[in-house]
Amino acid sequence: MSQPDPKRVKTDDEAPYELIYWPVIPGRGEFVRLVFEEAGVPYSDVAQNIEKGMNAVKSLTSTDNIGDEHNPPALAPPALKHGDLLISQTPNILLYVAPRVGLAPKEGNGVYHLNEIVLTILDGLVNELHDTHHPIAISLYYEDQKEESKKKSEYFIKERLPKYFKYMQRVLDAKTSGEGPWLYGDSLTYADLVLFQAVDGTKFAFPKSTEALKKSGEYDGVFKLYDAVKERPNISKYLQSDRRRKYSEGIWRYYPELEEE
Amino acid sequence: MSQPDPKRVKTDDEAPYELIYWPVIPGRGEFVRLVFEEAGVPYSDVAQNIEKGMNAVKSLTSTDNIGDEHNPPALAPPALKHGDLLISQTPNILLYVAPRVGLAPKEGNGVYHLNEIVLTILDGLVNELHDTHHPIAISLYYEDQKEESKKKSEYFIKERLPKYFKYMQRVLDAKTSGEGPWLYGDSLTYADLVLFQAVDGTKFAFPKSTEALKKSGEYDGVFKLYDAVKERPNISKYLQSDRRRKYSEGIWRYYPELEEE
């Protein structure tokens, strides 16, 4: 057997970026798309063809998948192929892509701060929001865990949403956030795109609660940043294109009863 | 106001490593401790003094904390101080430390594969196990969400545990795992230490279910790797020392009723 040497897994920077994700929903793939769209860097997106997209994800997540000579198997999409390299896990893909497309510093330790902010938003706000409609098991339908969903949502709205919005506002209030509306330093980074998508999904799933947070005036920086990302020329064009999926199933779902008093 | 430049957040490699984590429990701090212990690299651990540890965590997580001139605020421990740099989020701390102490490659793309494996184990197996005893809200006692915990645990034992063990076994079956018992390449990396702690905590929380997985013979590589880490001279010394906390509260808790048929 060959002796794999991790140092030798190199990529050709000229190779195309290929996103593998579920078709139809925005989901976690959206965080990756926004990075390429903002940077204006071409990427292919297998999800644009429903059948091809389904097949690509099924082959990725098959328990027969034990990777290849360069790459270990992934558990779940999104995955990104770049030359011989295949990597998975949203924050990991972002960490790889962002410095290459100018949305994170290429040197120094700033990238560990960005990764920290991104992990806090993804692992916290995004995953907990998902669990409001699947608190018991992801293999069960929402309808079969509706009562528990209602209970979890009450705590999510009352305690967790304000906690994460307060955290994002604190990062914006920190000295490290610089002059502009951005989370870290003086220019837009991939962390700002992650915040945008997390807030946008939250607005869809819990519109009344998000509106109440906005009206409180305690998180003005967060909503200002949200607007600033939305108005970026490349992002604005993307959001109006049919490459941007509509919310439906997946992480961000709208069940009005979860917000009722 | 000064213009922070992320590229300028440098650290002195001779600076001491200082872990900030809750006292008494092993928790997520344990993943960081194991890296330093295996590498034989000195680190301070404020959790060794209960009062100092509690104060350090309280000051870290205070909503008044807006970081300092070098660092954004953290939401939750563990955090690591290294010279002027302060970073949080377990997989992020590991990503920073491991290449510096010889437990991950310093160059090439191997680190993205290791980060992917570590994120899958931490975000998946570890977080989902935590949620078996807190499916509704972390602000509620277990006793107040016992019924939902029982329901969630049934699915966790039946579906999620085998899914993650199968994933870890597939990574070991991959060509990228090399000759030895290790997940990636031919020598121990920090991903192996993460697997060890995740399996060790699972054994404590769900002993019967873990034993059943072992007896099935389908995950022999996982249990062989677990033993191989446990027998490492530095790890073995550490596990017998009083620096290793006993399981009690936190992520890994033993509620026998959650495993009952």
Image: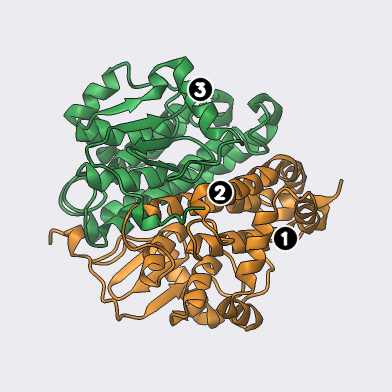
Chain colours: A orange, B green
Q: Picture coordinates of residue A184 (x, y %)?
A: 49, 56
Pick out the residue farthest to the front: B1
The chain under label 3 reads B
Q: Nearer the observer, disc 1 or disc 3?
A: 3
Q: Picture coordinates of residue B172 (x, y %)?
A: 27, 51
Q: Which residue is mark 3?
A: B55
Between the C-alphas of marks 1 and 2, the distance is 20 Å
Residue B148 in sight: yes
Question: Which residue is located at x 44 percent, y 42 percent?
Answer: B88
Q: Which residue is mark 1?
A: A203
Question: In the image, B101: left or right of A113?
Answer: left
The chain under label 1 reads A
Residue A137 in sight: no
Who is closer to the viewer here, A93 or A163? A163
Q: Which residue is mark 2?
A: A171
Question: In the image, A248: left or right of B128?
Answer: right
Q: Residues within 10 Å of mark 3 (few under 14, many from 20)?
A: some
Question: Which residue is located at x 34 percent, y 40 percent?
Answer: B194
Circle 2 SS class: helix
Question: Which residue is located at x 39 percent, y 47 percent?
Answer: B92
- Measured along the vertical axis of the image, is residue B77 above or below residue B242? below
Residue type (three-letter) at the residue carrying disc 3: Asn
Circle 3 SS class: helix
Q: Picture coordinates of residue B8 (x, y %)?
A: 35, 54
Residue A15 lies in quadrant: bottom left
Circle 1 SS class: helix
Residue B80 lies in quadrant: top left
The chain under label 2 reads A
Residue type (three-letter) at the residue carrying disc 2: Val
